[in-house]
Image (cartoon, grey):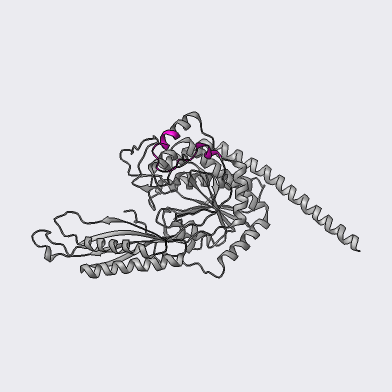
Amino acid sequence: MKLIFISGCLLVAALNSIAQNNTFKIGGNLKTSAAKNIQAGYEDYKRIALNIWDYAEVGFKENKSSLLLQNTLSQHGFTIEAGVAGMPTAFVASYGTGKPVIGILAEFDALPGLSQDTSFTKTPIEGRTSGHGCGHHLFGTGSVAAAIAIQQLIEAGKIRGTIKLYGTPAEEGGGGKVYMVREGLFDNADVVLHWHPGDKNEVTYSSALAYRSAKFRFYGVAAHAAASPEKGRSALDAVEAMDNMVNMMREHIPQESRIHYVITNGGKAPNVVPDFAEVFYYVRHPERATVESLFERVARAARGAAMGTETKMEYEVIDGTHDLLINKTLAADMQTNLEKVGGITYTPDEILFAQKLQSTFLGKIPSLDSAAIVTPLHTDKNQGSTDVGDVSYVVPTVGLSTATWVPGTAAHSWQAVACGGKDMGTRGMIAAAKTLAFTAIDLYLNPALIKKATDEFNTLKGDYKYKPLLGDRKPALNYRD
C-alpha cells in the first residue's frame, strides 16, 4: 500500500507538471498573439495618444480626450457606461462575461502651466496653457491598447472572463478614482492593473504617500490702502500669517511629511486692501492617519490666522488619497512579463535629442542605455501620491512604469511634455500595453494566481475598512478654475 501511495503522489505531481506546462505553452501563444495585435495597432494608438497630447485637457475638463478613448473601445465591442460617479468624463468600458473580472486603469488629464512643444528647449505652444507633464495621454491610450488585445482573445474564445477599462479623470489633484471607489465600481473586480509613464522600466514595488488637499479661503474688509487702511482687514494678511505658521510648523513634524502650497488669489491691486484671498495646500505622509493629524494642524493655523487678522476663514477639502498597497504576488508576475517585453532602444536622432535634453537637467544624469533596461524588483522611496492607492485598498492592484521619457527627466516638467509628444513616448507606451496584456493573460489562465494575490491583499488590508480621505464631498469638478 505504501508503494501505491507514493506512486499516486508521483502521478499527481506528473499530471500537475503537465498541466502547468500546457498552461505555460498556451499562455505563451496568447501573449504572442496579444503582442502582435498591439504592435499592429501602433500607428492608430500613436495617433490617439498624440491627439490627447494636443488636447491637453486638465482634470474634469477632459471631454475630447475621454470621448476619444470611449469611441475607440466602443468600436471594438465594449459596452460603455459614461459619466459615472458624478464625473462627466469618467467611464467604465466592459467586454465579456463572468469571472474573472480584470480591470485596467486609464488616465488622461493634463497639467496647467506646462505648455510645450517637442523640442529640446523650453518652447511653450502659443495659445495653449496646459501640457501632459505626467504622460497621461500615453497612460490612457496604452491601457486601452491592452484592453483591446484582451477583448480580441475573449472574442476568439481563447480566454474566458470579463475585461474592464476604467476611464479615470483628474488624477492630478482631483481624485477621480476615489469617487469611483466610493461608488463601488471596483467591487466586482478580481484584480486591477495600471501603469504610468516614467524614465525607466520597472514594476511598482514601493508605496505612495497618502495625502489630503484643501483650498483655504479668507474673507476680510476692503478699503483704500493709503487713505483709510484702518478701515480694512486684509485677507491676504491672513493667508501670509497662515503660511508663516505652517512654515514654522515644519520643524516639528515627521521628516517624511510633505506640505506645499500656492497662493491662488492674493488680491487684485496693491492700493486696495484685499477682502478675499485663497491658498491651496497639499499635506502628505506615508501613513494616512498622520496625514489626517497634520491636516488638522494646518487647519488650526488657518483658524489662528483668521483670528489674528480679524478675518473669516473657510476651507474646502479638494482631494485625498490613500497610500499604495504593494501586492508582491502580482508584482512578481508582472516583473516576469516586463522582462519578457523589455525596454526601448533609441535611434541615432533620438540619442542626439536625448543628449541635448539632458543638458537642461539638474543633478545626476543617468545613462541613456537605461531606457532599454528592466530594473529588478526593489523597494525605493516614493514621494508622490496617487489615487490608485484608494483602488489598492479595495481590490488587489499592481502597476509598472516604462521609459517614455529620456532617462533623468523629472515628472511635471516641460521636458516630460516634450518627450511625450515623440516616438520614444509612444514606443514606451506600447511596451507598457504589452506588459499589461501579458499579466492579464496570466490571471485569466491561472486562478491560483488570483487566489494567492487575494489572500495577500486580505492580509495587507487586515481589519481596515476603507474610508475616503476626501469625505463625502461631491467631485470638485471646477477645482482647476
Q: Position of residue 322 (x, y in %)?
A: 47, 61
Q: Quadrant of the N terminus?
A: bottom right
Residue 432 sits in quarter: top right
Q: Is residue 170 above or below residue 299?
A: above
Q: Position of residue 7 (x, y in %)?
A: 87, 57
Residue 328's place in the image compared with 336, above or below, is: below
Which stretch did the figure color magenta?
A: 354-372
Which residue is farthest top?
Answer: 348
Q: Is residue 68 above or below residue 254?
A: above
Residue 371 x, y percent position in the rendering: 52, 39
Which residue ends up furthest to the left in the rendered image? 227
Which residue is painted at 46% across and 56% down in the image? 386
On screen, residue 159 versus residue 128, left or right, reads right
The answer to which of 346 and 31 lies nearer the viewer is: 346
Picture coordinates of residue 361, whole percent (x, y): 40, 40
Most foreground residue, 111 or 190:
111
Q: Residue at x 34, y 64 (%)?
A: 249
Question: Which residue is painted at 50% across and 39% down in the image?
Answer: 45
Q: In the picture provided, is 169 more to the left or to the right than 186? A: left
Please give the name of the residue rendered at 28% of the width and 62% of the height, measured from the top-left corner.
244
Residue 241, quarter of picture: bottom left
Tell me, yes or no, if residue 71 can be seen here.
no
The answer to if 52 sits in the magenta stretch is no
Q: Is residue 241 visible?
A: yes
